[in-house]
Structures are given as C-alpha cells and as structure tokens.
Amino acid sequence: MAESVVTTVPGGWAVLAGILLCGLAFFAVALDAALSARAQGTGGGWGAPLGRAARLLRQRRRSTVAADTLLWRIGGAGMLVGAFLMIAVIPLGEWTLADLDVGVVWFNTVDVMVWALVWLAGWGANSAHGLVGGYRFLAHGVAYELPLMFALVAPAIAAGSLSVGEVAAAQDGVWFVVWMPVAFLVFLVGVTGFSVWGPFAPALAADIGGGVLAELSGVDRLVLQAGRYLFLTAGAAFSVPLFLGGGAGPVLPGWAWVLVKSVLVLAVLVWLRRRIPLLRPDRFMEIGWVVLLPAAVLQDLVVSLVVVWKG
Amino acid sequence: MGLSGALARLAVRATRVLVVEVPGHWATRMEVEHQLLRRGWRPAWTPADADVLAVCGVPGPELSELVDRLWEQMPGPRVRADITSPGTVGSALDAAAALLLDTPHHRTDAQERAQEPEIPEDADHGGHGGMGHGGMDHGEMDHGEMDHGGHGGMDHSGHGGMDHGGMDHGEMDHGGHGGMDHSGHGGMDHGGMDHGEMDHGGHGGMDHSGHGGMDMAPGGIALAGGGEDRDGLEMDVLHLPLGPVLPFWPAGLVLRCSLQGDVVVDAEASVVDGAGAGGPGPGPAPAAVVWCDQVMALLALAGVEDAAACARRARDALLCGDEDAARDAVERLDRTVRRSWLLRSSLRGVLLLDRAGLERHGLPGHCRGDAHDRLLSRVERIRAEAGGTEPTPAEDGGVPWAVVPDLVTGLELASVRLAVASLDLDPHPAVQAVGHG
C-alpha cells in the first residue's frame, strides 16, 4: 500500500487499547449477570464481575495428580493473551496499533490458536471431564472454523484488501452488512464459537461438571474465564471495521462510533445467549457443513460477481 | 489488612456453593438453592469452584467418605455447612458467610493442609482429581474389591507420589497371586514404573494382558485398558463414575460408566449407601415439585438458562404454596419450551422409546417418545397440577434406577445426561429402593 488509510500509533497506546478491551468485556459480564439475576428473580447483578474476580483472586490455586501443569497453564493464560493480540489490528476510528497488510489473516490466525489453547486446558488437568470438554470444543471447531474463514473472505474481496483499515474505508457508501448479511451472521457464529461461549460452551457444560473448567480454581480459572469474554469482545469489535462501516457515523468522532457499535453487537450476543440452548457438537457439525459452509461460499460468490460487475 | 478485608467482603458476595443432597433430603436442598440465589450466590458444579460445601441431611458412611474427599479437593478458603433441616438453612448460610470472611482462619487451614505428610507435594491443594474422576466422584472407588491380602511382602509404603485414589483397583485381579513375592521388588518405584515392560511371562497362569491397570503413569494412575469399540476397532476403555455428587443428577444415584471416547459402552447402576441408609427424610415430595425439579435439570443440561430459571421459580413457588406465582411461572415455562425449535432440535431423538422398547425395559407409558416428548408431557402434567383444572392423572409409576444402565449403554456422555434427566426416575432412589427390594 502506498498510503495507509489509518494512522499507526506508537506501541505505548496498546495499554489504552487493553484497558478499553477490558472495559467492554466487563460490560459484557455485568450485562450477562444482570440478565441472569433478572431471570432468577433476584435483584442486582451489575456489580457481579467485581465480586467474581475478587473471589477467584482470593481463592487458592490447586493442582491435580499427574497434571500436565505447563500445558495446562499455557492453555488458560493463552486465552487471555490471544484476545489482546487480536485487537492489535482493529482500527479505533483512524488509529490502529498495527496496520498489517494481512490484518484479516492475523485475526484468523489468532482465532485458530484457540483450538490448541482450549484443548490444552482440557488435557492438562488429567481429568476425564476436562478431556471430554477439550474434544467437544475441537468438534465444534471443525464445524465453525471453515464457515468463519469463508465469511472473513467476503469483506476482503469487496475491499480488494486484507488490511482491516482498507476494509473499513471501503464501506464509505454502504456498509458490508447490508449486502453480505449471511457472512455477517456466520462471522458472529464463529465469534461465539472461538470464545467457547453461549451456545458454543458444551466444552464447559454442567453435564460434564464444567468440562475444561472442572479442575480449575483461583487465578487459573479467572484467566481462562476472562479470556473467553475478552475473545468475545474482541470478536464483536472486529465485526465493526469488517461489516459495520468502522468509525463511520454522524456527529460522534470515529473512535466513539467504533466503541458504540462494539457495545451494541456485544449486548445483542449476550442477550441472545440466554434463549439459545447449547449446540451439541455432534448436531452442530451437520449445521456447520450442510448449512453454514455452503451459505458462506455462496455469499463469497455473490460478492465476487458484484465486484467483477462493478469493474 | 484493609485491602484484603475489602477483597474478602467483595468475594463473599459471589460465593459458590457445592450442594450435596443426601437421598431423601430434597426439601433442604431446594431451600438451599432458593436461599443462595437470593443472596446473589451461585451453585458450584465441582469442588474446584466451591467456597462452601453444603451437605443437606446426614450422610451415611459411604457418602460421608465421599463428602470428606470433596472437602479435601476444595481449594480454600473453604467452609463446610452441615444442614439437617430446611429451617436451619438461613442461619447455616449466614454462619458460612461469616466464616468465609475470617482470613486468618483460612490461612491456618491452608497451612495445616500443606503439612499433611501423606499428601503428595504436587497435590497440596487437595488435588485428587485423577483421570476418570473429574474431581467429583472419588467416593466411587471401590477399595473393597481390592484383594491385597496375598501381597504380604509388597511394600506399599514406598509409593511416595502414588495416589491410590486415582487408580481403578477394581480392574486388578490380585486374588490369584497369593504366592507372588512382591517384596523382591524392593527398590522399585511403582509410581513411575511401566509394568507393561516387565516380563511377567514366567508367572504361569497370570494374565496381565487385559489389565491396563498395571500400566502405571507417573503419579500412579492406571492407564486405560483396551477394548473393541462400536466398529470393532481397538480403543481405550476408561472408567468414569457419574454421581452421586454431580450437578442436575438424581440424588444418590451412581452410574459407573465404561467409556470409549465419550461413548458409554457399559454401565452399572447403584445407590450410595445402599437402600434407605440416608436416614429419615421428610418423606416424598409433592409430585408437581418433583416434576418441576426434573424439568429444571433437563433444561439446565440442555443449556437454556432462562427456561431453567423459570422452572426453578415454579418449583419454589409450588413449594411455598404461592399458587398465583406458580401458575404464572408454569405458563411462561410452557410457552418457552413449546416455542423453542432449537431446544427441540437439541433434544430430538435422545433416548427414543417406542412401545416395544417400553415393554422390553418394563417402563411406564408416559416415558414414550424422545426426551423432547417427555419434556412436553411433563410440563403438561405440571400445568394440570398447578392450575388445578383437572384431577391429577393416575400416576403409573416412576422409572426404577436399575434399568438406567440398559437404557444408556451406547449413548455418548451428553446424551446420557439428557436421557437420565428426561426420565421420571424415582427421585430419591435410596428411599424408594426399599420398595424395589
């Protein structure tokens, strides 16, 4: 690229980006807790994330017999780190931390890393429940990952670039979500998938005593749980430059629009979760390959034809 | 101390409680669940996540041992609350909250635990969660079946890092080794030894080939044995007991599963402490309350949290006699369950029982269909009961726990859980089992 459409800021700003990500994730947890409290008929809930974090910080760590501790901890902490890697390429209005030519691929790379991380977290505890959970996640991954990749391709084709800033800038007329809604939906399915969250949480489900989480306590549990919400937040934020016009919007500056849109996407995801049952890996496999994958490929075809036709 | 005190007060607001129901003490368990939600607390699914261990009722000897193991596995700060009746739930939880704040007490507790010599160093946090135990089912290891009688010379004291808890001794047949002299293996480290490498050929009639239990992984946990899977291929077999302390699982029921992957290839059911050892409970629960409880468990396992919360509120309203609230909650539950096509697709085909299947297993007619059919018919029965519109339909009996192994063999773990929750299992097997012989 001769001239970039976004300004790359010095690395020190990464701290602010991290704080913003944590703030949004905090909002997601608080909203989820508030909705849960309302459903249970009990009051409050908004302060729950603080209490939960304090509880886990106060709790002691534990280990299991013959645990593969190194891999176990890598799995948990990796989730926390991965989400921060992901936001490096998301432009906040006109600023970005890293204006990679292949930003979309970078995002995809990080989300594929989750496969290893969740499985390792399930493997490391040397517990049958954790291992079953880890493999449940892999089965989900096989079903959501390919559709997600094809969904990521659509905006890149339309913008003629894999740079996230370019993709956002290419939407100055009409947002991509308008003429590639299927790709947008498949993308959101993928985001919930790699966050091991909501309908994609059978790996952590009650039927196997929490699965991957079954043996985790204290700060180890905290980093894995926080990592999931940070991934969800990063994924929701990534949908803004990809499909929702980036910082485009009236009155407010670009960075504010990115935040507002991210919060809205997050809120919808959190709200939907309470109504959707867990998608069982064996059954979702069929949906992933028979419905989502062809739909995403068709979407790519339509986008390609439009791009060729417009010349 | 100001900061740690503030942290503790904040932490106590999000307390998680591992609830253990002694069979028959459903009323205490439901009251605990009700009250902990009102405090903003949540139930824990495993000891690893629990701050409070709430034992509802007085456990028998087998369950007591299990509860002690669960207690050992809790990371701490930890508090145990023994609750014998629904009336004392509030004060017991208050006391637990107060004790949770006592940081010096927990520091002492932690130090005392770490100094216990018999606990391996790497497990000083009480980690007994060996393979196959998921951290919750330790009471299920049947050491009674171990026949070490003939091993007089065997030096068990040398097994420093070995956690016998994780081993499935049931698989080992040492009975015939009377004359074997294990004492000769003096310097051997059983913990790290691979018995598979040893030449046992000289031991005449001994057959170690099928006993994967002799292959020791570091830490002394038996490796999985092999067996033919559904396609006739060799695959590892792992023994995993489900219950008696497992979220959304019938109180007291224990299902010892043999797993290949996550498919249950063989299962064996029993009841903790045998029949009727749970002590005097408050008697059988009202039918509508039991059904609401079962519906809640099924919905929670399927992962529809709002609907499960609705079923719980209906249950609690029925229990305290608030008929209007109960009717509202049941109506909402009915609408939610009927409308959700995702729930239908998730439960469709789980443990499908036709007429022939019912007869073969000797099951009552209301079990017909799949898990979704049974869910709908049960919600329908709750509506009739709560609305008082029709007389209670003649109840043709629950499902005895003894048939569960036949029903779940061949299913994968998630389906097993949904299948068990979808059946109208006798809710408190230990109490009911008296009638079953």
Image (cartoon, rainbow, N blue to C red):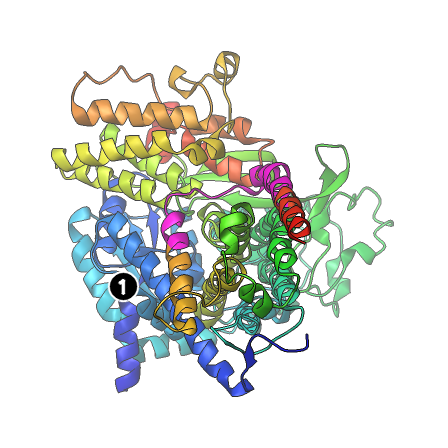
Residue B409 placed where, x, y %? 58, 31
Residue B226 found in image quarter: top right
Say which amino acid is labelled 1. Answer: Trp
Q: Which sits in the foreground, B15 or A17? A: A17
Principal SS element in the magenta part?
Answer: helix
Q: Is residue B435 left or right of residue A170?
A: left
Residue B410 found in image quarter: top right
**Which residues, given as a range, are shown in magenta?**
A268-296
**Eyeballing the image, is B42 above or below B340?**
below
Which residue: 56% across, 51% down?
A133
Label 1 Cα crowd, 10 Å radius (few <14 / some 14-19 / many 20+): some
Q: Which sits in the foreground, A83 or A207? A: A83
Q: Is residue B121 left or right of residue B382?
A: right
Mark 1 lies on a secondary structure that is: loop
Q: Is residue B140 left or right of residue A162?
A: left
Residue A274 placed where, x, y %? 37, 47
Q: Which sits in the foreground, B127 or A276? A: A276
Q: Badge 1 is on which residue?
A: A46
Q: Which sits in the foreground, A152 or B53? A: A152
State whether residue B361 appears in this view. yes
Q: Which quadrant is home to the N terminus of chain A?
A: bottom right
Residue A169 placed where, x, y %? 54, 66
Which residue: 16% across, 59% down?
B91
Residue A56 placed where, x, y %? 39, 70
Which residue: 43% across, 35% down?
B343
Q: Which quadrant is home to the C terminus of chain A?
A: bottom right
Q: Is residue A72 left or right of residue A47?
A: right
State whether residue B250 appears in this view. no
Specify the subunit that label 1 lies on: A
Residue B256 in the magenta stretch? The answer is: no
